[in-house]
Amino acid sequence: MSLDKRLDKLRGMLVGLAVGDALGAAVEFMPRGSFEPIEGYRAGGPHNLKAGYWTDDTSMALCSGASLIHCNQHDPEDQMQRYQRWFRDGYMSSTGRCFDIGFQTQRAIQRFEREGVDLSREIHPDDVDSAGNGALMRLAPVVIKFHAHLDRAISAAADNAALTHSDRRCIDANRVFTFILIRALNSDDKNEVLSPAAIAAYFAETLEYEVAAVTQGSYSQLDESQVVSSGYVVTSLEAALWAFYNASSFEEGAKLAVNLGDDADTIGAIYGQIAGAFWGYDAMPRAWINELHDPARIITVADLLATGITDQHLEILIEHSSA
Ligand code: MG
Ligand code: MG
């Protein structure tokens, strides 16, 4: 695969996340069939955003990406500090303030403010029965950063999830989606990307059983009426894979994903990661990039991660230009 094609797919993974998020934002929390189908960006929604503006999914992904660029590795403290800056000060928000935050994420940030980073990755007793999609929705930067090292990418994805979503289902969804995303970077054959046999061979018996059932192909058996688009990580993964499996282009699948309604922005953001990695940045509708809020910021974060450029590299450039 040419370098250009590789960079196009890596950039597509993060831009796709933001595009899916922005497409779904106007119909988040709305029941399926209760709204005029989404064909492009639309103003409004629960946060009354302008058309093309993105939500917490993209803000958290940008926080994570900026941290990986700054630290050149997964740094739990720096990650949490940036999520906290977003929550408190609107860092990396599309509007300059944090206007939406998931319950588990908010609780994790407040725990971090009280106690600092907890690296034990133990499931807190109050995490039982709470397995939201708030870590899966922001995964792309981790995969872009570590895509050349499969095992390292998968363990970094687990570590990223554990910062806010320590439930086994959230961690395993991140692990297996990383595997699928890296296959999407390396293949133009959808069956190869989603291969249940390849997933089973790599993970053996280590995946939580509900997550395993999805990646063994549950999504391929569903018609639209059977797809659940709530904030539960297992069904969110299933819904995003359903849209990808049934689409022949980025655009077609994005509409399938967000028109499911309910957690539409996040199903769109999860879908956008795999569709962007598979079809690439150049295959997205131009209007969806041009009308996206601040595409340059998203593209810059993606490209710095993809090329491995860190803050230290940028400082060298600045020093030499001012000498
Ligand atoms: Mg959102
Ligand atoms: Mg959402």
Image (cartoon, helix red, strand yellow):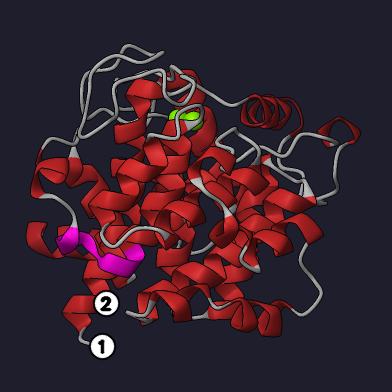
Residue 6 is marked as 2
Q: Is residue 96 above or below residue 184?
A: above
Tell whether label 1 touches label 2 (CB within 8 Å): yes
Q: Is residue 312 visible?
A: no
Give whichever of 76, 143 is nearer the camera: 143
Q: Is residue 147 left or right of residue 227?
A: left
* Residue 211, x across and y down, in percent: 71, 58
* Residue 240, x across and y down, in percent: 48, 50
Quarter of the view holding residue 35: top left
Residue at x-position 23% and y-position 65%: 316
Q: Secondary structure at mark 1?
A: loop
Give whichever of 23, 178 is nearer the camera: 23
Q: Residues within 10 Å of mark 1 (few under 14, many from 20)?
A: few
Residue at x-position 68% and y-position 30%: 104
Quarter of the view holding residue 159: bottom right
Amino acid type for the residue under numbered disc 1: Met
Give whichever of 39, 26 is nearer the camera: 39
Q: Is residue 188 left or right of residue 281?
A: right
Residue at x-position 83% and y-position 51%: 120
Task: Give the residue at mark 1.
Answer: 1
* Residue 190, x across and y down, in percent: 40, 74
